[in-house]
Amino acid sequence: MSDFISVTDLGHEGLASVLELAASVKKDRGAVSGSRSGRTVGLFFEKPSTRTRVSCEVASVDVGMHPVVLKRDEVGLGSREAVSDVARVLDRYLDALAFRVFDHRHLVEIAEHAAAPVINLLSDLEHPCQAVADLQTVAEHRDLPGTVLTYVGDGNNVAHSLMLAGAMMGMEVRVAHPDGYAPSVDVTEEASRIAAAHGGGIRVGTEVDDLVAGADVVYTDVWASMGQEDEAADRAQTFERYRVDERLFALAADDAIFLHCLPAHRGEEVTHEVLEHDRSFVFDQAENRLHAFKAILLHLTA
């Protein structure tokens, strides 16, 4: 068995296979119904969630796995009990462990002490399940190799997984960010190496108009994520010119699509007009979280 802590854990062939499987199960939701009957998956939420919680629980049930939902105050990861002890205990009960955490290092430690596959539902470093759904959504409109995706905003966990996943699939991923909010240098370097091996590219900079110009996909996320509420006012000023409005979206390709991982703050990182644009596919993207997680579960528990 393998883990899915980083989207790179799948490798190029594994990611391509998961994307193909996600598209397949979307077309025929009953095709894999009950195929993992009798197995269990733990869904641990250190952070509250809507899309992740519902999509993962429904996907688990669809493939026949019994989901066991655990919340932060029930487990006390690293406070009430050592991370390694939690991992070793849950590993005795469950066939797969899926965690939405603040600290990516906890996922690494869990994986070191559990034989069952460990799935990153979100951490401060990456959001790989989201990236799979994102690429699935893009692939519904165009071939991934050669596609230019521009992410506008904070160089956060979503940006990191998009860079890495896009690079593996031969895309050009651009990140337009304010000064001081660039993606991790380590992730940027890794994504650049991966892109070079697969015919893609990585561009990171502050000139938002230049980076959006001609893009096939324009993507954004909230300016202040969960846990950054005390920074929201300062970020709102810093990110002002990185709002995706109709003027900025018009700089992209004529057939460009708009994506957002949601929840969206209308009027902040994106205007109502762009979010509701006829080339906005944010709700297809949200739906694909279900199909993507189902494909990930099937891949890791084969």
Image (cartoon, rainbow, N blue to C red):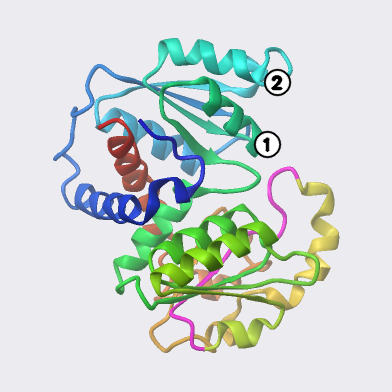
Q: Which residues are magenta?
A: 214-227
Quadrant containing the C terminus in the rendered view: top left
In space, the residues marked 2 and 1 are separated at their CA atoms by 10 Å
Q: Is residue 58 above or below residue 42?
A: below
Quadrant containing the N terminus in the rendered view: top left
CB within 8 Å, label 2 to label 1: yes
Residue 123, image x and y in percent? 61, 41
Q: What residue is shown with label 2?
A: 78
Badge 2, how many Cα within 10 Å: few under 14, some, many 20+? few
The residue at the point 48 percent across, 64 percent down is 194
Depth check, front residue: 293 or 280? 293
Q: Taken as a whole, is the magenta stretch helix, strand or loop?
A: loop
Residue 199 visible: yes
Q: Is residue 96 above or below residue 221?
A: above
Left or right? Give the position of 173 relative to 60.
right
Dot placed on the residue nearer the N-terminal end, 2 or 1: 2
The residue at the point 34 percent across, 70 percent down is 144
